[in-house]
Image (spheres, rainbow, N blue to C red):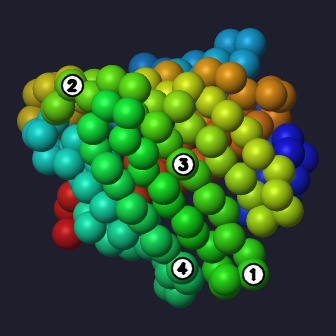
Amino acid sequence: MDQLLPAALGASPRRSRRLLHPAEGNRAVTETSDLQLRLSRHLPASPEEVFDAYTDPAQQKIWFSILDEQPGIVEIESDLRVGGTQTAVWGPSRDHLFRETQTFLVIERPHRLVTESVGSSPDGSTMTTHIEVTFAADGDGTLVTVVQTGFPAPELRDFFAEKAWAGAFARIEAYLHR
């Protein structure tokens, strides 16, 4: 899956690099070590608003495709409770769908969310990771920090750092600004 997922999404695998948030100056917001990913982003809303945007299926359906000219397919179902699951299915067409099912392990609204994530690509390749997301009040907004572990290869970890999470943060921020 390490070579297939980036190719399926139209990106070639790249090495990790330090990403800088413009408002943060030289503060690195992405770190990668071994097969762990840690990144942070300041979002312009309260922890409650950001937590809800991140976890509520109705809001997710909006921000998930907010930056796309042609959003394709986005289906999300969630049972937000410890032991519950959230399943997201998305892609450009019914014959080219990605799927992610997260099992909620810890829910501390609006400060912390821990999940086990099982993702699959259209070719049937799968990957299981552990994700912890924290939401901390930060000035006039929220500092969201993601720690994701269990990547099978550095290229996949780097893809998630540079494309998947960066894209998710950009979409959530656009949603919060609408």
Q: Which residue is mark 1?
A: 95
Q: Amino acid at mark 1?
A: Asp
Q: CA gap, disc 3 to disc 1?
A: 19 Å
- Three-letter code for the amino acid on which mark 4 is drawn: Ile
Question: What is the distance, in whole Å, between disc 4 and disc 3 at their CAs?
Answer: 16 Å
Residue at (62% x, 59% y) in the render: 99
Three-letter amino acid code at the position of disc 3: Thr
Residue at mark 1 to residue at mark 2: CA–CA distance:
37 Å
Name the residue carrying label 2: 108
Of label 3 and label 2, which has the lower sequence position?
Answer: 3
Q: Residues within 10 Å of mark 3 (few under 14, many from 20)?
A: many
Circle 3 residue = 101
Would you name the residue on which mark 4 appears?
73
- The residue sitting at 83% across, 51% down in the picture is 125
In which quadrant of the rendered image does the N terminus lie? top right
Q: Is residue 18 visible?
A: no
The residue under label 2 is which amino acid type?
Glu
Residue 114 placement, left or right of 149: left
**In the displayed structure image, the side of residue 89 where residue 22 appears, left or right:** left
Q: Please say if the residues under marks 4 and 1 sit with CB atoms less than 8 Å apart.
A: no
Q: Quadrant of the C terminus?
A: bottom left
Mark 4, other Cα within 10 Å: few <14 / some 14–19 / many ≥20:
some
Residue 141 location in percent, x, y?
15, 37
Residue 89 visible (yes or no): yes
Decide which of 110, 70 is in the foreground and name it.
110
Q: Of the residues tagged 4 and 3, which is closer to the observer?
A: 3
Distance CA(mark 4)–CA(mark 1): 11 Å
Expressed as whole percent of the image width and height from the top left, the position of residue 80 reads 28, 44
39, above or below 119, in the image: above
